[in-house]
Image (spheres, helix red, strand yellow):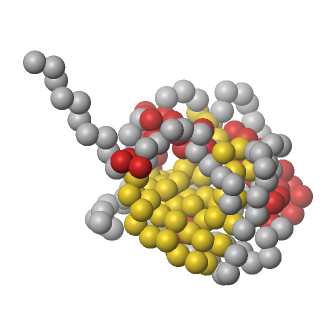
Amino acid sequence: MPDASVSRTQYYTAATLDGFIADDRHSLDWLFQVPEPGNADYPAFIEKVGALAMGASTYEWVLAHLKQTGEAWPYGQPSWIFSHHAHASVPGADIRFVQGDVAPVHREMRAAAGDRNIWVVGGGDLVGQFFDAGLLDEIIVTIASVTLGSGKPLLPRRILSSSLRLTAAERINGGFAQLRYDVMSPAPAVPAK
């Protein structure tokens, strides 16, 4: 079991039973149609987060959702938005637009987060980049009792079971199941003789 006092880089998300985090239009509307919320642990989770990473499509969806609902930017933590083009910012929010390799940005995020965790909010490809760079420590996925048939995959990478260790499986609010995985560091390469 990892040391709970050490900060971690986590992918915390909801997904459909058939493995999608958003529909083909990058929408999370499917999640709000599930009768019981599956994020009962969210307040305890977000309290331990010191910095966020988010992909452009997720950011655009959040902005559209906030505009529709009239809600304010929901994160007090500094947020890094990975994108290849310009986006509107949110007044009063600590939002930093970046592009390129996740490793140097992760170092900035780690410094900003201090002893708190980094949350890779989404999307799946961005999370895959953190995984590819060896920077992802944990995957927490809450599975909803709904299927979409197609959409944006949970994590569009081939990750073998030797890289993941199931640490918890729990039923939440009847219609959800939460799975927690530690992401194992790959074994160091053995030099050729």
Q: Residue furthest left?
A: 193
Q: Which residue lies furthest to the top in this view?
A: 193
- Residue 4 coordinates in the image, percent (x, y): 33, 68
Q: Which residue lies furthest to the bottom in this view?
A: 173
Question: Which image quarter holds the C terminus?
Answer: top left
Tell me which residue sits at (68%, 60%) in the image. Answer: 17
Q: Quadrant of residue 97?
A: top right
- Residue 63 coordinates in the image, percent (x, y): 79, 50
Tell me which residue sits at (15%, 20%) in the image. Answer: 192
Looking at the picture, does residue 187 appear above or below residue 182? above
- Residue 139 coordinates in the image, percent (x, y): 49, 56
Tell me which residue sits at (87%, 63%) in the image. Answer: 69
Question: Which image quarter holds the N terminus?
Answer: bottom left
Query: In this orientation, does residue 46 appear?
Result: yes
Tell me which residue sits at (51%, 38%) in the image. Answer: 158
Query: In this orientation, does residue 111 appear?
Result: no
Would you say 152 lies left or right of 69 here? left
- Residue 115 coordinates in the image, percent (x, y): 36, 60
Looking at the picture, does residue 68 appear above or below residue 32? above
Would you say 107 lies left or right of 101 here? left
For the residue pair 87 and 149, the one nearer the viewer reads as 149
Would you say 20 lies left or right of 140 here? right
Number of numbered callouts drawn: 0
For the residue pair 101 and 146, the one nearer the viewer reads as 146
